[in-house]
Amino acid sequence: MKIIKIQWQRLLNQDKTCPRCNLTEQELNDALIILKPILAQKNIEIVLEKRALTLAEFQQNPQASNLILINGLPLESYLGARTGTSPCCDVCGTAQCRTVELNNRSYETIPAEIIVQAVLNAVSEIKG
């Protein structure tokens, strides 16, 4: 069985995260519900790892929060998208937090359909 590894990381500060990361987590869970049966037919398993960033890690690199990696590469690389930034919330302080820029739109919360498309694009790149 082949494996697609998805790693999602976000700031957790005193067990709190920002609204956009909270909503992205819900969208990621919805995407997995869609993807699991599709990929099972192709003999591919999805492995999800959720990683909490410490406040110190976040302060060093706010762009590391709300980052989805698929087989070690950012979701954006499978979509021809780019990473942007925008102000977030009190949990994040004054940091400019990660957004996904795709088709002239900026996504603070990463929608399930974008996650699904990125994973399907990643699957098409798996050899053998």
Image (spheres, rainbow, N blue to C red):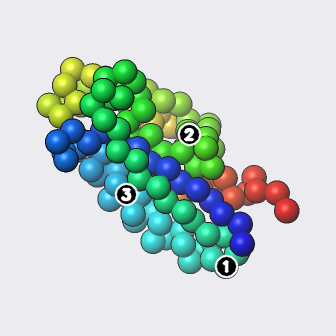
Mark 3–mark 2 Cα distance, whole angstroms, equals: 17 Å
Q: Which residue is mark 2?
A: 74
Q: Amino acid at mark 3?
A: Glu
Q: Secondary structure at mark 3?
A: helix
Mark 2–mark 1 Cα distance, whole angstroms, equals: 25 Å
Label pair 3/2, CB-CB below 8 angstroms: no
Q: Amino acid at mark 2?
A: Pro
Residue drawn at 48 percent across, 45 percent down: 68
1 or 3: tag closer to the N-terminus: 3
Mark 1–mark 3 Cα distance, whole angstroms, equals: 22 Å
Visible residue check, residue 110? no
Q: Which residue is mark 3?
A: 27
Residue drawn at 30 percent across, 45 percent down: 21
Quarter of the picture containing the C terminus is: bottom right
Of 3 and 30, nearer the camera is 3
The nearer-to-camera label among 3 and 2 is 2
Of 80 and 9, nearer the camera is 9
Of 53 and 90, nearer the camera is 53
Q: Secondary structure at mark 1?
A: loop
**Rendered view: 77 above or below 71:** above
Q: Which residue is mark 1?
A: 41
